[in-house]
Image (cartoon, rainbow, N blue to C red):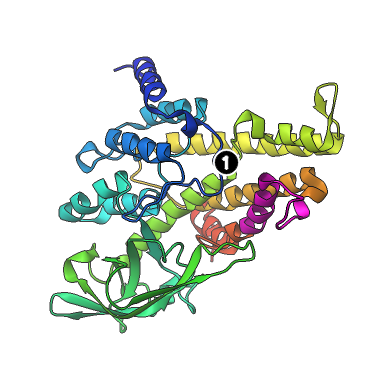
Amino acid sequence: MSLESFRAETRTWLEQNCPPKMRTRMGDNDTVWGGRNAEYANPEAKLWLERMGEKGWTCPTWPKEYGGGGLDKEENFVLQDELSRIHARPALTSFGISMLGPALLEFANEEQKKTHLPKIVKGEIRWCQGYSEPGSGSDLASLQTKAILDGDEYVINGSKVWTSYADQADWIFCLVRTDFKASKHNGVSFILFDMATHGITTKPIKLISGASPFCETFFDDVRVPRENLVGQLNEGWTIAKRLLQHERSMISGMGLGGAASPEHSMENQAKQYVGERDGKIADNQLRERIAAHKMNGAAFALTMRRAAEEAKLSTGPNATSSMFKLYGTEHNKDRYEVLLELQGTNSLGWEGDGFNDSELSTTREWLRSKANSIEGGTSEVQLNVIAKRVLNLPD
């Protein structure tokens, strides 16, 4: 099928299947995470997930044999263009899609792929990531959570921190130490297990933004079937590095998060708060600030598109994901700085009738954006990766 024909069919399908309310700006509680205990603020969100999941278009480039859409990269570009054209909301937001799934496609055995990937596509299981520990953040390979083989089960003890949505997740993909005599990079394994397993407790961490998406997670004699180990024993660091590249690629996309519907664009908000003159934003300096941000965003999007084109023959993301993560997070932080600047004193609210929902949300998201340069590897770590792996600078 030609791309023109595919675009026509895709446009027709989306027009017929994307519910009207799924073409509107998302509210704070509208994100669809899926999972066995999923709640939907809007019934149409559940319908949209079901239709996209059945089509495989929550994971459009994954193989059809695992529930994906089976699209090539050019077809996926068309699909994303058409979704953007109608301002369609994401049918599903999932760490299974952005991080775990690509790693499973590369490293899992066939039984693991057939067990987990279709459930990820349809949003039936919500995943969390067990990486960072109280003493192992940037130096992740120094992790101490241990897994000791006992018959056909691993017994896991230890703790994790900054475990996003661990209190709401169904399963976890986790790094554990399985060999304490080996070097820190060589004694790590990658394992999957159900968060309902006896011995797991979680404690939410309240952030400066007022939200509690991160958790402390504790494992006390948690017994996990031996077959849940992904890849080879003690070689989990290879999987961990690959998954981090996928995570960084996902986080870098936050920098493009300003693609709001026209009525909620920066330009319209600026006209609302500072007024307009001759059809333009009245404040010249602010107008230049918004224009510079939008030009940087366009250049960033084109660079990511070019990198995707150049990577067609590769097996996955590479060290350039660190470059995109570094720039994308800074660009997202800049976006909220611009929004606060244009809202002026309206951005000072935390609660109360004097501020609308959009203003309160912007203030909290501005505070939340400060974590962008920490999560998924700090900006300092990314600079080191860029220096070594992209620029080939000496140690």
Q: Is residue 343 above or below residue 35?
A: above
Magenta part of the chain: 347-369
Position above or below: 92 against 83: below
Dot 1: what SS?
helix
Q: Is residue 171 above or below residue 46?
A: below
Residue 209 lies, with reference to residue 14, above or below; the image says below
Q: Is residue 70 left or right of residue 296?
A: left
Q: Position of residue 277 (x, y in %)?
A: 86, 25
Please give the name of the residue rendered at 62% of the width and 48% of the height, measured from the top-left corner: 332
Residue 153 coordinates in the image, percent (x, y): 18, 75
- Classify residue 378 by image quadrant: bottom right
Kindly identify the residue that appears in the image at 66 percent across and 58 percent down: 367
| Front in this rendered view, residue 370 or 249 | 370
Q: Is residue 147 left or right of residue 300?
A: left
Residue at the location (46% across, 46% down)? 41
Q: Quadrant of the N terminus?
A: top left
* Whether residue 312 can be seen here: no
Image coordinates of residue 263 in percent, x first then y, are 65, 30
Q: On the rendered image, what quadrant is the C terminus found in?
A: bottom right
Query: Quarter of the image holding residue 225?
Result: bottom left
Front residue (pair 317, 158): 158
> Which residue in the structure is indicated by mark 1?
256
Question: What type is the residue that disc 1 sits on?
Answer: Leu
Figure label count: 1
